[in-house]
Image: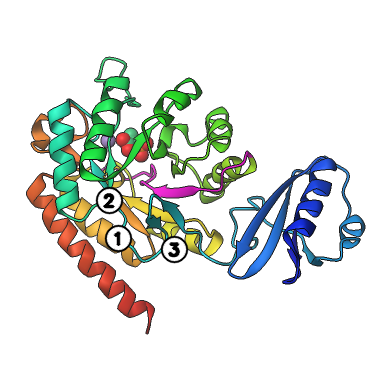
Amino acid sequence: MYVVLKESSTCEEILALKEFIHNSGHGALEILDGSVKKIGIMGKNGNLSKEMLKEFSIVKEIIKIGKPFKFVSREFKKEDTIIEIKGRKIGATDLVLMAGPCSIENRDMIMEIAKVVKENGGEYLRGGAFKPRTSPYDFQGLGEEGLKFMREACDTYDLLMVTEVMDTRDIELIGKYTDIFQVGARNMQNFSLLKELGKTNKPVLLKRGLSATIREFLMAAEYIVAFGNQQIILCERGIRTFEIATRNTVDINAIALLKEKSHLPIIIDASHGTGKKSLVEPVTLGCILAGADGAMVEIHENPSCALSDGEQSLNFAEFEILCKKLKKTLEFKEIIRCL
Ligand code: PEP
Ligand code: MN
């Protein structure tokens, strides 16, 4: 349920209403939807009725949300959410390009990649220091050392850092370095992790689970909101299907549908989505036209020597071409959006 507030409502009146909601055992989520002020009422167990809320003169309307995912839904917020981090915007018309290696392998490689990302107009450096590997014998990442290398690379080239957190015990450590926490596909329903990330004030890039339905994906995002953090970026990275010609099957339907169902920004990761470097460019561009707000791409100076995911990583020349086409695709998207 949420309440729509009268335009004339003052900060003091809103504060008093929020306090009342809290005291009744609910969370109160204040948002501005365009120019409309709203308060989402979270939780079911407290004692709060519509009649009680109507006592507040600033309450214009009380609306029940039909969906199981409530505060990430378009029903609650009509306007697209734009996430602002250090002056960059995700969910607006800006180019959102998150590129980098699958794993940070050493200092020189991440410095070199950061330079390439910046030169091609990227604003975000991705890279894993804590890696979710299928085999315990595969490279597991450099841990904190990798975070330090990546932070240095981001600071040198003025990039924002995106790195994965797999365990609640690492949130504090990773939070000291990163600008955006990534939750990987394998952890999309790690509810303890989602709850703890909900208590942080950094944006969370939430990847779709390997076999997650759209409803489950949005419910996972709802966990983060319910625990206090509204800064969520969804990421479609392909799902498992009967098709084994590619690593995963990118669900382009999901991009368009998530835009209908949710106000959150969404990006496409065609590297993990396809597992095949030749498919990364066409699938990325297609998903941008279907509504994705940006792209995540794995790159490596010499993909055949990468410690992880070399088959799906672009080399620098391939990345440069993708970036050029991505910029043109965004221009074209803007043209067709205005038709
Ligand atoms: C990654 O981005 O490095 C990664 C492991 O992706 P996913 O969780 O989508 O498999
Ligand atoms: Mn990878």
Magenta stretch in the rendered image: 227-246
In three-dimensional space, the C-alpha distance between marks 3 and 1, rounded to whole angstroms, equals: 18 Å
Quarter, ligand 1: top left
Q: In terms of depth relative to the viewer, which is nearer, 259 or 211?
A: 259
The mark closer to the camera, 3 or 2, is 2
Give the residue drawn at x 39%, y 64%.
Answer: 291
Instruction: Using the image, tell me which numbered label, if any, was put on residue 265.
Output: none
Q: Is residue 250 visible?
A: no
Closer to the N terminus: mark 1 or mark 2?
A: 1
Instruction: Using the image, tell me which numbered label, if any, was put on residue 256.
Output: 3
How has the structure been colored for display?
A: rainbow
Give the residue drawn at x 52%, y 46%.
Answer: 217
Closer to the N terminus: mark 3 or mark 2?
A: 2
Query: Is residue 180 rendered to the left or right of residue 169?
Result: left
Q: In terms of depth relative to the viewer, which is nearer, 111 or 286?
A: 111
Give the residue drawn at x 65%, y 69%.
Answer: 36
Q: Is residue 265 visible?
A: yes
> Of all residues shown, which one is farthest toward the top?
137
Q: Which residue is mark 2?
A: 123
Give the residue drawn at x 40%, y 38%.
Answer: 182
The answer to whether the residue labelled 3 contacts the one labelled 2, judged by CB atoms less than 8 Å apart, is no
The residue tagged with tag 1: helix, strand or loop?
A: loop
Does label 3 point to a residue whose CB lies under 8 Å from ligand 1? no
Q: Amino acid at mark 1?
A: Leu
Q: In terms of depth relative to the viewer, which is nearer, 287 or 61?
A: 61
Q: Which residue is mark 1?
A: 95
Q: Position of residue 30 (x, y in %)?
A: 67, 54
